[in-house]
Amino acid sequence: MDPKMAAEVRARSLEDKPNAGYSGTPMWKIKAQLQEQAASANSGPLKVPEGFKQVEKGNPMYYNDKRQVYWSSKDGLTYVYDAVMKKYSQLYDGHSYDTRIAVGQCFHDKAIQAKHVLVKDLAKAGQALRMSLEHLDRPCALYALYEGHRGKPGTGMGNVCSDFCVKHLHQRLLPKLAAFRGYWEDTRLEVAMRESFEELDAEFMEKHPGLTDGCCASVALVTGSRVVV
């Protein structure tokens, strides 16, 4: 099989199950180990890091199944396969920014159809689900406000749609963010957010056909110095 095709098949498999093979090893440690191994071989040919196997004879790329990353014998750098762009992209270690975020809320006592979600550390939330988000710049957070409408507040049950969004948006978004561990361009972040809502809408309609409950949403994904709304 062509090595790029093999890599693409493997990458698609990981995108379906982004936590597959997740060892919990911090990304900075993976890169540090590889850099140390490469530095020790500066006096001669690059030595293949432990745990990496050549994708195909004659191909400079080596793959570590446990860490789900590639290593190039050409430059000694670590890569991941970008299934969207169909190319290898350098493994990215998220940077920390001196950014402060202040979030507040104000609801009247009868706003039972309004719901909110505040995830101040999305990376920790990802760890709980065995999904690594260390490649995203920090702070990395998610703030969401859902305002339900056409519900039946008189019954005391709130709004089915806003409740559904509160419980399931992160289940759509986090796997997308975890699937690619290279650098996330602005457009890619926007697409991930839009696709997450489109999938959420389709799932809600499928599970609740004929239901009149609806919901407006205002969601902000913060990563480093950038905000996607």
Image (spheres, rainbow, N blue to C red):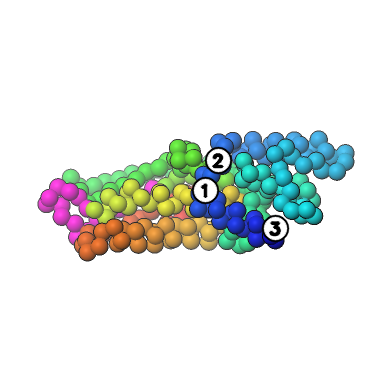
Amino acid type of the residue tagged 1 in the rendering: Pro
Q: Is residue 186 above or below residue 121?
A: below
Q: Is residue 146 magenta?
A: yes
Q: Horizontal placement of 189 versus 90: left or right? A: left
Q: Nearer the viewer, residue 72 or 9?
A: 9
Q: Give the residue type at disc 3.
A: Pro
Q: CA distance from mark 3 to mark 2?
A: 23 Å
Q: Residue at x 76, y 46 (%)?
A: 76
Q: Secondary structure at mark 3?
A: helix
Where is mark 2, residue-wise? Answer: 22
Q: Is residue 93 visible?
A: yes
* For the residues bearing labels 2 and 1, Cβ distance under 8 angstroms: yes
Residue at 57 percent across and 61 percent down: it is: 84
* Disc ID at residue 3: 3
Q: Which residue is mark 1?
A: 18
Where residue 109 appears, x then y in whole percent?
18, 45
Q: Which residues are magenta?
A: 143-159
Is disc 2 surrounded by few (<14), some (14 to 19) or many (20+) residues within 10 Å? some
Q: Is residue 54 magenta?
A: no
**Rendered residue at 45%/45% (across/down):** 141
Q: Residues within 10 Å of mark 3 (few under 14, many from 20)?
A: some
In which quadrant of the rendered view does residue 11 lie?
Answer: bottom right
Residue 49 image offset from top left, x and y in percent: 74, 39
Q: Position of residue 189 (x, y in %)?
A: 50, 56
Type of amino acid at the residue the image marks with label 2: Tyr
